[in-house]
Image (cartoon, rainbow, N blue to C red):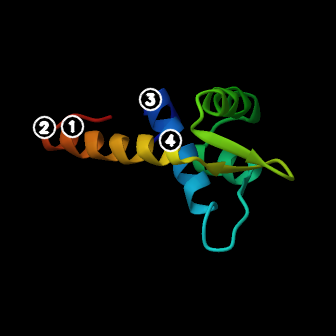
Amino acid sequence: MPNSNRTHIRIVADILDTARQYSYDGYKGAPVTHLIRKANVPHRRLSSIVSELKASGLLNEVPRSKYQISEKGMEFLKSYNQFKGFAENFGLRV
């Protein structure tokens, strides 16, 4: 899906999902470069979104400029995925 067709909330979900993948299994957080690649956004935009997510308590910064998803972030991602599935059942894109 091209970047211009994604909503802000979809980009947020991509960032949180990447942070989730790097928050477990021995990883100590997702580096900024991984977040940039997964979200497919420029560094400046990513920085703005990450600041928003940290302020909302959805993302935690850990040493070495890495990011882990918080429990609140996990709840958000779960709810987002449920809503996305619900909307897609009605032929809508989220």
**Which residue type carries mark 2?**
Phe
**Can you give x and y, in whole percent of width and height, for residue 90 in the image?**
12, 37
Label 1, residues with CA under 10 Å away: few <14, some 14-19, many ≥20: few
Residue at point 68% right, 43% down?
60
According to the picture, the residue beneath numbered tag 1 turns out to be: 87
- The quarter of the displayed image where residue 84 is located: top left
The kind of secondary structure element at disc 1 is: helix
Determine contact: label 4, label 3, CB under 8 Å.
no
Whole-angstrom CA distance, mark 2 to mark 4, is 28 Å
Name of the residue lying farthest toward the right: 64
Determine contact: label 2, label 1, CB under 8 Å.
yes
**Which residue type carries mark 4?**
Lys
According to the picture, the residue beneath numbered tag 4 turns out to be: 72
According to the picture, the residue beneath numbered tag 2 turns out to be: 90
Vertical side of 71 occupied by 45: above or below = above
**Can you give x and y, in whole percent of width and height, for residue 94 in the image?**
32, 34
The kind of secondary structure element at disc 3 is: loop
**Which residue type carries mark 1?**
Ala
